[in-house]
Structures are given as C-alpha cells and as structure tokens.
Image (cartoon, coloured by chain):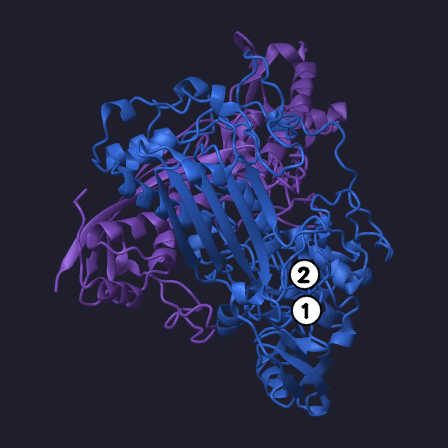
Chain colours: A blue, B purple
Amino acid sequence: MLEFRKEYFADERDENLNEIGKPTQRQDMVGHVTGTTTYFDDHKLAGLLHLKVLRSPHHHARIRGIDTGAAERAPGVRRVIRGADVPRNLNTLLSLLNFGKDDEPTLAVDKVRYKGEPVVAVVAHSEREAFEALAQIRVDYEPLPAVFDVEEALKAGAPVVNETYPKNSFEYHGRYDHQKLRFGDVERAFAEADHGLEERYQMSPIEHAPTETNGCVAAPETNGRYVVYTCAQGLFFSLDTCAKILDVPSNKLHFVGGTVGGGFGGKVDSLTEPLAILGAMLTGRPVRYVLGREEEMQFGSPRGAERIYVKDAVMRDGRITARKVTSYFDSGAYTRLSSYAVIKCAAHIPGPYTIPNVHADVYCVYTNRVPATAMRGFGVTAVDFAIECQMDKLAHLVGIDPMEFRILNAYRDGDMKAHRREAKNTALIECVQVAAEKAKWPIREEFRRMSSRAGGGGARAAVPHTPGTPAGGARPPAPQRTTYDRPPQPAQAPIFEPQKPSPSPPSPRQPTPAPATTQHGAARFSSVFGTRRR
Amino acid sequence: MAKHRGRGMAAINYPIGMNLGGDPSQALVHSNPSGKFTVALSSIDLGQGMKSVTRQICAETLGVPVEDVYVDTADSDTGPHCMGSFASRGTHRVGNAVMAAAREARGVMMEAAAEELEVNASDLETDGRGNIHVKGAPHRSIAVKDVAIAAQFKQGKTISGRGIFLVPLSEVDPETGEMSPATCYAHACLVAEIEVDDETGEVAMVRMDSAYELGRALNPKLVEQQLVGGAWMGVSHALYETPEPYYPDPSHGPRDFNEYVMPGPGDICPHDIAVLERPAPDGPFGGKGPGEMCANPVLPAVANAIFNAIGVRINDLPITPEKVLRALKAQGGARPQARR
C-alpha cells in the first residue's frame, strides 16, 4: 500500500503539471512482461566464439610458470590469451576520474591476489570446449600467506596484498592511509558527557545477485571497429575503460546496451568487456563472455564488508554531543571503487543528525579476497546500520522513546553539517512523524509539532572550534562550490527550475589515446584527493 | 520455547548523485517530421525505469503528450556521454540533462509555430495534447505535427535540443574532510515488526510501515516499485544474504540460489508506505530519486526490532538464525522488552 502525503511541503510544489506525477506505464513494460525485450545475450551472431577464464585456486600465490601448450592444441580452441597479450595489463577503474593508481591486471602475471583471479582466457567454438581446454592448463603456483581481516591487514608485518599499496591501505591526499573528518572537539565532549557508548559493527559482503549475470558479446564491425553488446551500468565508463586497457582510440569501440537485467552496482567494473573485445580482435570473430551463476556469486565483485566502530557522547536530556567513527572498508585485493566509497562514507557521518562534535577516520583496506565494488547504498548502507543501531541503544540508555530521540537530534534547515556545508531541503523530522503515525507508535504532541523548517540555523549553523586543524579553530565555512550552494534565487522563479550547467563545462574527452605521460583522456579532472596516477 | 514479537525503527537520509559531483550527463532531443520526439541517451535502464521517467520529463518540458516521446537508450554512437546508472543519479542528473535538451527543442518548436501562425513565439503556449495555440485564443492553434512538417520541409529548421547537467566537482580537505558531497538528500523512516522464534533463531517479518521523502515523485508507480522492492532487498540484507557467512573467514561461499539464501514469496509481509515530496531546488521538477536509499532503513530497523523482541543486540550482518541462537544462549534466554 502506498499513499501520498501531499499536505507536507505543499507550498514548495507546483502541482499544475501535465505528465509529471502521473502513473504512466513504462515504455518497456510490454517487452519485459512478455519476454520479448532484447538483452545483450540475445545477440546470437554468426560464427560466435565463447570465452572462459582460468581462475586462481589460491587466495595469494606467486605464479612460477604457466603451461598452455595442451590447451592451445585442444579441440575447438581458437586462441589462448595470457597477461602478455593484454596491451595495457594494469588499470584502476577510477583512473578515468584521475583518482588512484593502476593496480589491477586484466589477467594475472606475477602473482594472484585472490581466489578466483583470472589468469588465462581461452576462446573456443563452444563453452564446453573452452572449459575442457582450461582444464589442461598447468599453472605452477607458490602459495603465499594471505590476510583476510582488515585490522590484521593494517598491522606491521602483515602480508602485502597489492604491491601498488604496500601498506595494504589506499593513500589519500598523498600522505594519509585514511580520510579524515574533523568537526569540533569530541574528546572534550566525551569528558563532559553524562553517558558514553562505544560499539563495534560488522557487515559481511553481499552479492548483487542480478537475474542476468555479468557478460557481453563483442564482434568486429567494419572499418576496424568493434561493437560490444553489454549489460554495463555505465556505457561510456566501460567503453573508456576498455579503450585504455586495449590501447585503442575510443571511437574504435561501439557500445550498445541500456537494457539490463538488474545491476545494483555489480555491473560497473567491466568484468567481461576487455577480454571479450580482445578475443574478437585476436580471432576476428564475435566473442561471447558471460559469467556463470557460480562465477557471478563467487568471483563477481560483491558489496564489500565494512567494520565500523562508533563512540557517542549523550546527555541525560537526550542530546548527542559527540560522535566518533572509525571505519574500515574491505576492498579485497584491488581498489576498484572502494576508495570512492570511503569519501562518501566520511561525508555521511554522523548521519542525518546535528551533532556539535564529530570525528571520523575511514580506511580503504586491501585483503586477499575478491575485489569489492559498488552496491546499492555504496558507502552508506553499513554506516546507516551502525548509526541507527547506535541511536536505538542511546535512546534506551537515556530512557527516551526512539522516535522522539531521532526528532530531538534530527538535522534541520540551516544547521551546519560535519562536512561544513549548511543543511538544506531537509525532511527527516517529517518522515519520523509520518512513520510513527502510520505504525500507531505514540509520540508526544511537542514532537508531532516540530518541523525541519523551524528551529535550525542560528547557533546550530556555526563551525565549532576544531583542535588540530590548520585554521586552528572556528572559521566561516569555505565558499560553497556546488550549483546548489549558490545564493538563493529570486522567489518568482519556479522552485524546481534546474540550475544552468556550469558556465564553462569542461572540454570533452580527448579523442586520441593519451600519451604515457598524461592521464588517459581525463585531463579535465584535477586530482581532488591528491593521488595522481603515475 | 516461544515466539516473541517486537518493533524497531530507523531513520536515514541519502545523498543523490555521485559523491562530490563531477558526474555529467548529456541528452539530445529531436523531432521527426511527424512531431514525434526521440530522446538519445547513453544512460542505462537497469529495470528501475530510467527510460520512463526521462520520457515524462521530456514530454512535460516540451508540452507534448508522453506518447509522442520515445527514449532510445543506449548506444555510444548516437547517445551522448553519461556517467552511468548508479549513485541514485539517474532521475536527478539525466533528468536535468533531458530537461535542458527539451527546453532547447521547445524553443525551436515554438518559433516554428510562431512563423506558421504569424504571431510572436512568446504569445504561444502548448496544451499538452499535441497542439500549440495563442495564449487566451485557443482557436488560433496549430498541431505539433504540422509545426514539425513546416519546420522540416518549409522553414528548414531542426526541432532539436542539446542538454547537459553537471554538478561541478568538489574538493575534499585532507585535514577536516570539508567538502560538498551532494546537492540534495532523500529521507526515510521505517518501522519493522518482526517475530523471533527462540527455538530456531529464525526471524520472520510481520509488517513494515514507512515514510519516504524523495523529492517530487515524477511517476508514482515507479516510486512504488522502487520502494517496495528496495525494502525487500533491505530485509534480505538484514536477515539472509552474504557470500561469506563467517566473514572474515572466506569459506562457505555459495554457488547458486540454493546456497545463497534470500527471502522468498512466503517470507513477504505487508508494507504500508507514505510518500512525502519536498522538491529538490535543483532537481528536474523537484525530483531527487528513490533508488538506493529505500533499502537502508530496513537493516537497522530489523536489528532494533529483534532487541525489542528478545533483548539481544546483534551488531553483525546478516542476522542469521545461528547468530540469534548464540546471542540468546549467551544472554541465558529471551528477555522481551516493553511492547511498542
């Protein structure tokens, strides 16, 4: 059952619209429910070959030698692909945003860093022949000690997972092994608090489990181009990643997609596209590379695990006065996108509450497991779990109803957030009020009357004295930088009027492959985290 | 041995779009000579309804019926750049790009109509049903179809538009974490009622009540689809799913849907949802996006409900029957808290 509560924020909406707000049926509905929608794997091309990869059986091992002789002579095999065949066999996904160092090979060369890491690919006439050829490949491994626990991985003497980051942690701003958030003085608040509470939370990895597993079909087009039918969640993200790894101009690749059988973040890593295109380049034939369900579950990147420590200070009257968070993202053996999630997590702390003293250290840690990637709520889901369990415990501790406790501490329009931007357009209080009403969960009248639009700002808008930060104390928030942070527009303009694009949008990607000394077509982005690709 | 009921709640907010911005999307809108419009994107429809919501945004902005707009995703040869479908960015970022492109196309359409009607373009308005007429004089009207024909074959005008939306990239202060992570936030509060069997450790969902604020709901059915489905993904995360049940020990990885446990149809419970709409100042018609955030409040709400039911706090996800039984054993049995 779903109802609209139009009485809330009615004065902020123009309801005089034709198409917006109507329950129009999806334009792709009939195709989806009758099974006639075309997905990537519906492209059954003539002469189609199949690609499968040999995966590491070890969590961590040195590769002493690879013997593919028997596989190359096996029936139906058109091509065996090894790391040396990949033009640029080292990449990191966010290099397109100029963030992080290349740390992940398409096919492992010297070492395997997680169980399931691709080592050799076979292109054959059928999937069965590809699997049979894989079984004939001999790899000589020297197993190495592995590390699976994020805090163990950070200790001195832990096995080095990924030599690009020898301390087993992503490097922020060229000097820190974590991202900091500092707002106010948490230690003083802990000393002055009526109660303190420190807890440890752990979220295990989660599989995206899309109906359609990761995969693509790549085929030679005319004029030296390659067409790729794909389920990628970011079409150009995948195209540009492939252009870099395969060292071809981006206009040699033609990606077709857009209709995907579930993603949830598990289809942003270009797990199959680079090898499928390489297979098509090396054989001149269409090549299909699709993960089986077992591969998808075991070796398709999951939502990474997170371990989160939360320490709070709370007063008898229910005001939270400090929140200190230490969080560890388990990135697995390679960075992929976890370094980004760390920043998003830091921005999210302390949750949708106005807390005058906040302190966070967030780490991206390498372990010998399948690299993690984005998933629904990336960087936020686990910390929300930790914060909201913590909120329930704090409410219990001070004997206040948990709904009222949320409303009491909720952020409101005009409050200063811990990342030093003003809260605007907030609506947490109203959500709590309506959920309580729907669940017949009684809250007191004074809490029913509170509003996100009243009571914020003023003293709550101040940036507090923050020991140990360069400015040495209170200073006005820095100039707001997003379009949204511009001064309010005149009231006569419709409130939903979108901002104009920035006056000088960055120039488009360079069409030619970047020379080795510059970033791959990503020169428009400065390095916001101070970690430039070399 | 007994079954214990409990209720728990959680409240959350969620940032819309890629953290720190810097994630542009483009759109192209053009009309064929019959006045039917195509939106060219490279954005992805994962099943969430990207094509449908951008179609409505385009139709609203152009002032034509939604049936006259078709969204063609995603071909890198014809669709302009888009960062991708993730980070709850589709409605907000792509929607804004489509709106900008449709505005430009509408400008040409109105000029072409003005030329045909021999009036000033600023005196014209659309009726949303496929016609353009003089304000206050509906009889002085021309069909969009006839405008498109005139533009193409007589006036030599292209009824088309380009749009891009970009939230400029924010920097992050290394010492303080000062940054501009997002331009708008969605909000939610959810109450979960559960039942714990203290003999088996199993947790069953009894019902959920929730309130979600997600900016303007551009299509209520698509919103419902996201919120209902997303909440179930949250239940699944809270109680069932993980490929590493003894994390950080990596063993016992699942291989298929028999071994990777998720809730089935028999595990579903009633879920009553209220939608609040506080328009985002920079959203397309105020839209934010219901994508990722709808799963998030369920996880802690379920954990808090388990405490209410049996008095144990489980801080490790997922909350499997094994974890519930071990916690009950450590506590010496269930200690139900005050009923809520």
| Label 2 environment density (alpha carbons within 10 Å; few <14, some 14–19, many ≥20) | many
Q: Which residue is mark 1?
A: A276
Rendered position, A126 above or below B85: below
Asked which secondary structure carries label 1, the reply is: helix
Quarter of the image for the C terminus of chain B: give it.
top left
Residue A24 in sight here: no
Which numbered circle lies on residue A268?
none
The x, y position of residue B183, in whole percent, is 57, 32
Whichever of callouts 1 and 2 sits on the residue coming sooner in the sequence is 2
**Which image quarter: residue B166?**
top right
How far apart marks 1 and 2 lie (CA) works out to 9 Å
Residue A494 in sight here: yes
> Which residue is rendered at x = 56% and y = 68% of the image?
A370
| Label 1 environment density (alpha carbons within 10 Å; few <14, some 14–19, many ≥20) | many
**What residue type is disc 1 on?**
Ala
**Which image quarter: residue A534?**
bottom right
**Residue furthest toward the left?**
B1
Q: Which residue is mark 2?
A: A228
Rendered position, A277 above or below A396: below
